Structure formats: C-alpha cells, structure tokens
Image (spheres, grey):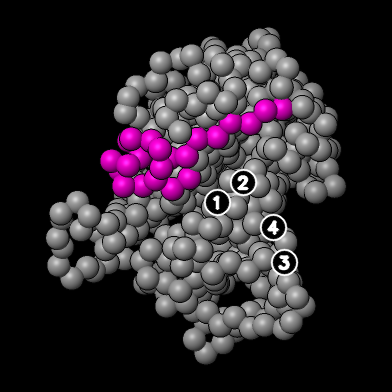
C-alpha cells in the first residue's frame, strides 16, 4: 500500500495518538503507526502508558489498596470480614481487561476522527521526491507512506542496571513488575522513583517484604524536602524498608531469586536476597528502528531526538514529542506537546509551560506537586512565603479515615503570585489540577484563599494552605 498524508505520527502512546487526533480535528489527512501488540497479536495502541505503565499500575494499586483496607481498616467502620485472601490471577485479569478497554478506546477514537491506523513499525526511508518524507511500515501489512509532516512519538524504554539484564522473571522492568504471578515473599527494588515506589506499594500491601535501594543520599530528591520527609515517614511506618546512599556492586542469580551485593551509605558491604528484583532507575529514549541516520535526524548526546522549544527537529517538517525528547517523561506532558505540534503545523501559536506540568506519585499517601520547591526557590534567591495545612485538620479526611499529609503553597513575598504547590495525602492527584490552573493564570495565594471551596472536601486543604501564606488559616 502506498498513500500520502499531511501528517504521519510514528507511535501511538499518549503523545502520538493525541497528536494524530488533534491533527485530524484540524482538517489534516492523518495516519498513525504503532507496533504494540496484545497477547493475541492484535493492535494495542497507547504505548507504555496504557500497556505497561500508567493504566495497569493504577489498576493494581487500586486492587491492592482495597485488600489493604479490608485487612486493616474495615473494622474501624464496623465492617467485619472473614479470612482475607488474594487471587493474583484474577487481579491480573482485571488489569488486562482495563488495558484492553483503553486500547480499544484509542482505536475507536482513530475511527471517529478519521485517523488511518497502521499496525507495525514506522521508520524513515528517505526524503520524498515530491516533498515531505517517505515512511516505511513493516508488519503484517507492509506499506510505504509519504508524509508532508512527521511526528516522532516513539517513547522510551526502561534503563537496565549495568550487569543485570532484564529477564522479566527474576530481574524485572516495569513490564515484568506488572505481571508477577504470585505475591513474592521478598521483593527488592533498585530506585525510589515513581515506578519503584508504586510497585513497592502494590506488593507490600499484598504481603511482600519490600526493600528499596536508592543511590541518592536523599529520599525523593526532586520533591519538596518537607513533603519528601513526610513521605519517607509514612512509607517506613507502612513497612517499606528504604536504604539511601547505596552503591550496587553486583546482582547475581540465587537459588530462590536474586542476590544483590551493595555498599550502604557508610560504605559497609551488604547483601539483599530477594525472590524478585524490580529495577527502576530511569528510562532511555526509544529511537531503535527509527532509521534516523538514513535521513540525518539529529539526536543529542543522550540519544533523545534533538528539538527546539516548539518540538521541531533539525529536519524540515519533522517534529518529536514525549519521552523521546527533552523534558519530564510524563504522559500528560507528551499529550500537551502532541496537541501543540498539531496546532503549530496548522499555523497556530500554542504554548507548553513545563513549570505548570503536574507530577504525581500514586502511592498511599499520594504525592503531587507543580511548580518550584522550597529548595529551588532558595537556590534561585527568590523571596517567598509558605503556607501549610495538615489533612488531620480537614473534616473530609477525618471522615475518610486518612489524615496523613499536608498541602503546602509557596508564593512570592512581594506579589503573592503562586510559585509552587506541594501535597501529600489522600487523593491529592485530583487536587493538584487546581494548583496548576492557578499557576497558569498567575493567580495569587489570596486568589485561591478567596475562592469558595465545597465543604466538607479535601480541596479545602488547598484553600487553607493558601490562606496560611498570609498567616490566616481558619481551621488550624
């Protein structure tokens, strides 16, 4: 098959499929190429996020949270349960069903928006004689496409630990961590980032003895220090064992799993024996098979597609978005870039501000933030004021039975403009959007404090923290 399109998107993860849909909405003839397959070999668009990332991890987090609540908190509500059991196979089946719903939803959206979908791997061939780019699709139905504009949205892959290749049986990436068939007695995690903490939370709730090994001397170094300290205290209380400042020396097979040899923060030699080991030390851009060298597509020293602030590459009408370019590796950041690129192709002037991109860790308690941390503001020499409000003083949190954590608002000392908002507590993944919106509109802390928030609601903690910036919180 040969066809010409205004826009061809390579990759159907959050950045890619959204870019394709927005381009089609703007009137462009659009195609999207993606090679993800489900267990039966069928198309599974959605990228890492849908297949082995955001969506399945949240499904398992919800299942394990329900198990934990039944085992430890139902009695507080007067609810009695018998002997508690976990059917991991059924839990995994539910996860797979949710993933499939999302895969099918994307295929439906392609059809609805008249995006032509090609199931296979997309790669550059050459510059087309009539202008644009020739793109090859390899798979069950090979095709050659001509694209006036190309959007590269090929995502990222997990970074392996040197000397410890992923086998997805004992040494696991995020993929294997989401497909463990039974609750491991002992689970080791290298890296205390988002994936490590979320997966550690899942299996800890279900009964695993979980140890987290982190190379950095501080816990959650990118998070506001006050929030990070609160998180470390909460996770330790739950039973997560967290070792900071470690240096991994070797990972070796053991009769019952894996043996990890490392030096602790004091330099003493230690050994961790675990049934499973999850390695979560970051991700690398996925440009393998793109055939970038054939057309001279520029990559930077770390392998990312080199782009400017508008996601333009060094090649005419070739763009790149999401994990394969600079910036935070977040699904929603990729989506925003995908929309922006489609609109730039149409001659519009959209804007993506990384400073108002929210971050979330879906542990319990959840952690969320947007904007600058206190340590960043101090390093910048910015004069600011801080207001905090604990969930233990929030009526809805008390009713939920979860009063861990707080909301923190940072505002400019002179103008009162909100510079950052940081949260740890129940459902803060849902609360952080208000803070992002406030920052997009350059709101002041007083603006948030003057807005009427529903009572009783968790969102009142945000209002109270904003009021606390001016030392006038009403309920604490």
Circle 2 sits on which residue?
226
Q: CA distance from mark 4 to mark 1?
A: 13 Å
Image marks 1 and 3: residues in contact by CB distance under 8 Å:
no
Say above or below: 77 vs 379.
below
Q: Residue at x 80, y 49 (%)?
A: 302
- Which residue is depicted at the point 49% across and 26% down? 473
Find the distance from the CA under tag 1 to the CA under tag 3. 19 Å
Q: Residues within 10 Å of mark 1 (few under 14, many from 20)?
A: some
Distance of label 2 from label 1 (alpha carbons): 6 Å
- Which of pointers 4 and 3 lies earlier in the amino acid sequence? 4
Check disc 3 and report the residue beneath it: 245
137 relative to 239, above or below: above
Report x, y in % for residue 300. Answer: 83, 43
Question: At which x and y percent is residue 310?
Answer: 74, 23
Q: Quadrant of residue 474?
A: top left
Please tell me whether residue 397 belongs to the stretch shown in magenta.
yes
Residue occupied by mark 4: 218
169 sits left or right of 295 in the view: left
Quadrant location, the N terminus? top right
Is residue 58 visible to us here?
A: yes
Q: Secondary structure at mark 2?
A: helix
Give SS at disc 4: loop
Tell me the mark number nearer the camera, choosing from 1 and 3: 1
């Amino acid at each position: 098959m040969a066809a010409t399109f205004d826009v061809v998107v390579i990759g159907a993860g959050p950045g890619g499929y959204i870019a394709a849909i927005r381009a089609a909405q703007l009137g462009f003839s659009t195609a999207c190429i993606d090679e993800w397959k489900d267990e039966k070999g069928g198309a599974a668009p959605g990228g890492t996020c849908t297949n082995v990332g955001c969506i399945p991890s949240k499904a398992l987090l919800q299942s394990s949270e329900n198990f934990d609540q039944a085992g430890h908190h139902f009695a507080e509500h007067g609810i009695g349960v018998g002997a508690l059991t976990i059917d991991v196979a059924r839990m995994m089946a539910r996860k797979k069903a949710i993933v499939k719903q999302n895969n099918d939803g994307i295929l439906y959206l392609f059809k609805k928006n008249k995006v032509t979908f090609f199931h296979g791997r997309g790669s550059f061939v050459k510059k087309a004689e009539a202008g644009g780019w020739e793109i090859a699709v390899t798979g069950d139905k090979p095709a050659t496409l001509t694209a006036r504009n190309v959007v590269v949205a090929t995502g990222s892959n997990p970074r392996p630990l040197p000397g410890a290749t992923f086998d997805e049986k004992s040494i696991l990436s995020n993929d294997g961590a989401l497909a463990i068939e039974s609750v491991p007695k002992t689970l080791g995690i290298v890296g205390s980032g988002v994936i490590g903490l979320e997966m550690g939370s899942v299996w800890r709730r279900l009964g695993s003895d979980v140890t987290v090994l982190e190379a950095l001397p501080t816990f959650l170094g990118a998070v506001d220090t006050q929030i990070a300290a609160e998180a470390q205290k909460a996770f330790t209380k739950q039973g997560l064992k967290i070792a900071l400042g470690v240096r991994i020396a070797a990972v070796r097979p053991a009769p019952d799993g894996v043996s990890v040899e490392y030096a602790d923060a004091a330099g003493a030699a230690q050994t961790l024996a675990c049934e499973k080991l999850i390695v979560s030390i970051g991700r690398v851009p996925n440009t393998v098979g793109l055939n970038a060298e054939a057309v001279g597509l520029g990559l930077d020293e770390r392998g990312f597609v080199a782009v400017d602030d508008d996601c333009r590459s060094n090649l005419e009408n070739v763009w790149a978005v999401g994990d394969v370019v600079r910036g935070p590796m977040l699904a929603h950041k990729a989506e925003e870039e995908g929309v922006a690129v489609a609109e730039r192709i149409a001659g519009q002037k959209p804007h993506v501000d990384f400073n108002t991109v929210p971050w979330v860790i879906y542990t319990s308690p959840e952690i969320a933030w947007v904007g600058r941390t206190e340590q960043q503001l101090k390093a910048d020499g910015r004069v600011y004021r801080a207001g905090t409000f604990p969930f233990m003083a929030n009526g809805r949190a008390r009713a939920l039975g979860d009063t861990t954590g707080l909301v923190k608002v940072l505002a400019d000392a002179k103008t009162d403009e909100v510079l950052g908002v940081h949260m740890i507590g129940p459902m803060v993944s849902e609360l952080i959007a208000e803070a992002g919106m406030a920052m997009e509109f350059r709101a002041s802390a007083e603006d948030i404090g003057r807005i009427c928030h529903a009572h009783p609601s968790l969102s009142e903690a945000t209002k109270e923290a904003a009021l606390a910036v001016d030392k006038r919180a009403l309920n604490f």
